[in-house]
Image (cartoon, rainbow, N blue to C red):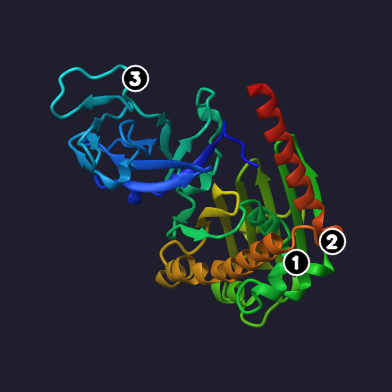
Amino acid sequence: MFVKNAWYVAAWPREITNKPLARTILDEPVVLFRTTIGKAVALHDMCCHRALPLSLGSVVGDALQCGYHGYKYDASGACIDIPGQSKIPPHARVKVYPTVEKYHCLWIWMGEAEADLSKIPDIWWMDHRDWKPSTPDMAHLNCDYRLIADNVLDATHLTYVHPTTIGASSIVEFEPEITHTQNTVRISRWMLNRPPPPAYAKAGDFGNAHADRWAAVEYWAPACCVNFAGCVDVGFGGAGKDIKASPRRVELVAISLPTPETAGSCHYFFAFARAFKHDDPEMDRFFGPGMVKVFEEDFAILEAQQRMLEKYPAAPRVSTIYDRGPAMARRMLEKAVAAEQSGTR
């Protein structure tokens, strides 16, 4: 269930060096490396000679050399050197995948259609001066990447999976508003005059005071979710209010960018950006190792789900009103896949 003509995160830019990096993306083996001028290159990870993964070779100058018989490939995927043979067959090449570095991500285009830069998810918070970003290491999960959107789009799990950090029982007291476009689903709710979650109470210096809290999430097909979250002093929250006028404020986004590896595994890239306390070392720790621990609580849930779904694929499941958003996102993705496959045929 993959949309191929789309941009996915292949790696954090810091991961790509002059050492080959192997990564399976959408069931295809990819090798990533940098040239001498710093250009990130993504090639099909299989030598055209004897099928050895090129990631087992080495970067020589601006070329990637196979570790079996020394064939060298340039950034276009063309074989430029065969040891002991001066003539290089024109079909001696491997597939090259377009890549772009933007928003602190290395994006890759896996489709056959021409790469469309306008389709890169607009996660502008990562580059904006009013927001401070954080990009923890990618997590490899043994779960269908679609389960991540299901999880993020149903905030009621926060109460039970994250009770000591970002969860609060007040979530189920307020019914969400759900809106959608052709390519997005948005679920949002205000929780007014309620105790903030423990992590937000500490981050915003709320102590035992109540707060006005918001929680919203947008799904952008095929594989991007943006959570908008925070809280302000009572009376400064709600539709049409200016949250920046609040004496105390926690305002953040959490961005989920799962890249499918196989049907049952994915590379989970996630990032945070905050619009408060930029110079606070404690907040740097919270949005680094602290938030990683929060996400790790989700990892255990997602992988356990995957194991059960694989073992009992026909087991009946019950849906509630809170499953409307995830269901809409699934249908949106299914339509995108069907439309792409129809166009390909």
Of the residues shown, which amino acid type is indicated by label 3? His
Q: Residue furthest bottom?
A: 208
Residue drawn at 61 percent across, 51 percent down: 226
Name the residue nearer the viewer: 201 or 141: 141
* Distance Cα–Cα, label 3 vs label 1: 54 Å
Give the image location of residue 127, x and y in percent: 45, 45
Tell me the tag on residue 316. 2
Tell me the tag on residue 8. none
Residue drawn at 62 percent across, 77 percent down: 198
Q: Secondary structure at mark 2?
A: loop
Name the residue nearer the viewer: 38 or 303: 303
Against 277, is 57 above or below? above
Contact (CB < 8 A) between labels 1 and 2? no
Q: Select label 1 or label 2 by which is in front.
A: 2
* Distance Cα–Cα, label 1 vs label 2: 21 Å
Can you say which quadrant of the picture contains the N terminus? Answer: top right
User: Label 2: how many residues lie within 10 Å, few (<14), some (14-19) or many (20+)?
Assistant: few
Give the image location of residue 21, x and y in percent: 34, 48
Of the residues shown, which amino acid type is indicated by label 2? Pro
In this rendering, position of residue 143 left or right of residue 102: right
Picture quadrant of residue 147: bottom right
Against 31, is 194 above or below? below
Q: Which residue is mark 3?
A: 91
Q: Which residue is mark 1?
A: 156
